[in-house]
Each structure stands twice: as structure tokens, then as C-alpha cells.
Amino acid sequence: MDFVHSTWFWLLLIVGPAFTVLTTLIRLARRETSSAFSASTSPQAWARQQQQAKPSSSETVPPATRHRS
């Protein structure tokens, strides 16, 4: 009886973690990455500061000049 119990112990000790790792990798492979955040998510303080520091698009684009030929 001791041999049966020790065999099952080692079998579970080896197969258990291997099964856990395998199922975790399968779930991660099928999981879709979501780029949308929930409505309750707000940007961090540093992100807000960067957005406020960005110049508007009209300031970054130089005015068009016409060249006469």
C-alpha cells in the first residue's frame, strides 16, 4: 500500500505543475489584447501633464510658403 501512495504522490507532484503551466500558456495564447480601457480608468498625472504641454497642431506645422519660378 505504501508503494501505491508514493507513486501517486510523485505522479501528482510532477504532472500537477506541468498541467498548470500548460493550461496557463493555452489561455494566454487565446486571450485577446484589449486596447480599450474601462470608463472608470483615468490617465495618470504624468500623462495629463504631457498632454497639456503638447503644442497644438497649428503651432507645430510651419506656414506654407509659395515659391515663384
Image (spheres, rainbow, N blue to C red):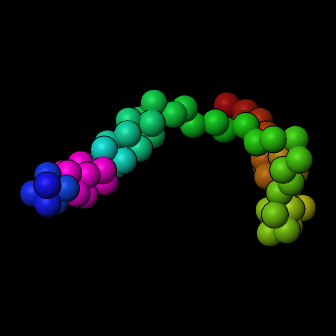
> Residue at (30%, 44%) from the top-left corner?
19
**Extreme front residue here?**
1
Q: In which quarter of the image is residue 30?
A: top left
Q: Is residue 11 left or right of residue 36?
A: left
Above or below for 63 versus 52: above
Q: Which of 36 and 49 lies nearest the eye of the viewer?
A: 36
Q: Position of residue 15 (x, y in %)?
A: 24, 48
Q: Reply yes or no: does residue 4 show up in magenta.
A: no
Q: In which quarter of the image is residue 69?
A: top right
User: Does 13 appear in magenta?
Assistant: yes
| Residue shown at the point (73%, 37%) measured from the top left | 36
* Camera sees residue 63: no
For the N terminus, which image quadrant?
Answer: bottom left
Q: In this view, does 12 lie above or below 22?
A: below
- Say which residue appears at 37% left-offset and 39% top-offset: 23
Could you tell me if residue 17 is visible in this image? Answer: yes
Q: What stretch is highlighted in magenta?
A: 8-17
User: For residue 47, which quarter of the picture?
Assistant: bottom right
Q: Look at 81% across and 63% down and name the residue there.
A: 44
Q: Name the side, left or right, on which 1 lies relative to 61.
A: left
In the rendering, at what x and y percent does residue 37 appear?
76, 42
Q: Main secondary structure of the magenta part?
A: helix
Residue 14 located left or right of residue 30: left
Residue placed furthest toward the left: 3
- Give 43 or 60, whichever is nearer the viewer: 43
Left or right, 64 with respect to 22, comes to right
64 to 11, vertically: above or below: above
Residue 5, image x, y percentages? 19, 56
Q: Where is residue 27 shown, x and y percent of the image? A: 45, 36
Counting the numbered discs, the total is 0
